[in-house]
Image (spheres, helix red, strand yellow):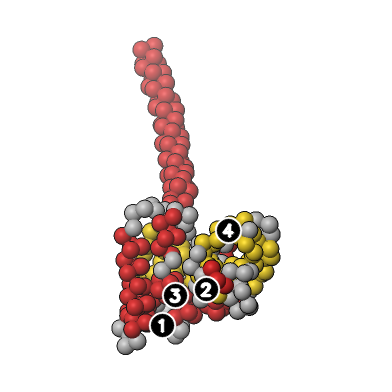
Amino acid sequence: MSVIQWESMKKEIIVEQQTKKTGVHMTQSSAFTKELAQEIVRNLTAFGKLTTRPFQKRNRVQIKKKSIPPVGEYPVLVDTSVLIDGRILPIVNSGFFVATLIVPQFVLAEIQHIADSADPIRRSKGRRGLDVVNALKNQRVNHGVKVKIVADDPQDVKEVDHKLAYLSKLWKARLLTVDFNLAQFARAQGVKVLNVNDLAQALKVALISGEELSVKITHAGKERNQGVGYLSDGTMVVVEDTKELVGQDVVVVITKVHQTPAGQLFFARLK
């Protein structure tokens, strides 16, 4: 074999060896690339699940919240008696009350029924109740109070009072009333009650023995020589030796404070 042939064969062997090495390297590189791509896909899939689960959970929570009737902030269910009573309007206008007043349609229906009564007194009370509802809806003095008329009416509950207690408990709302029996029933159901009469008692003038005040004698008392007058909040004052002073303003001194189930009763004498 000549030197030239040997050199040529040697080159072919070297080229063949390099080709085999390159093929092995390329095969290994291709396998590594394929495995790396699969790992990336697996990681992206796992990451996608982690990022979508919180949004899915949040959406479920939002749907659950929407199933609860929107009753506003500080919800207070309003009883028929409160609207007929009418004192809720000046209380709201005073600014001491902040709430979303909820008036169910069945309460309005009851007031409408009273307004259609043949009895003139009941008819007047019903009309006053409707006027109070409209005044509350249109009032602009107290921006912390809003009025919502709702159509919710639990059909399996018959009595209006029971409906109010049921909805108050369902919505975790307070119940506004002047009805003593309804207040007691609702409290027994675990409902928080706001009684306008309780507020009125809390706002009564607080007097002590020896205090002086001016009062107008409106009529004679039960006992001899007694006269009776009233304070601005309606509290009765019985004054000795004023039977003959009916219709006059007198200055008196409080002698005794008597507590009754209806509130305080003051006894006094002329100064």
Looking at the picture, how far across and down is residue 233, in whole percent?
52, 63
Q: Earlier in the sequence, mark 1 or mark 4?
A: 1
Please state which of residues 64 and 121 is positioned toward the viewer in this rendering: 121
Q: Residue at x 33, y 63 (%)?
A: 135
In this figure, which residue is indicated by the disc labeled 3? 81
**Which residue in the structure is indicated by mark 1?**
155
Give me the residue at 46% from left, 84% from top: 159
Which mark is first along the chain, 2 or 3?
3
Where 57 falls versus 11 (above or below)? below
Relative to the observer, which residue lies in front, 57 or 113? Answer: 113
What's the distance in space between the residues labelled 3 and 1, CA to CA?
22 Å
Check the image and name the residue furthest to the top: 3
Q: CA distance from mark 1 to mark 4?
A: 59 Å
Q: Height in image: 105 above or below 56?
A: below
Q: Which residue was labeled with disc 2?
A: 219
Circle 4 residue? 251
Specify the amino acid type for callout 1.
Gln
Horizontal and vertical percent position of residue 173? 49, 66
Q: Amino acid at mark 3?
A: Ser
Tell me if I can see residue 168 in this picture: no
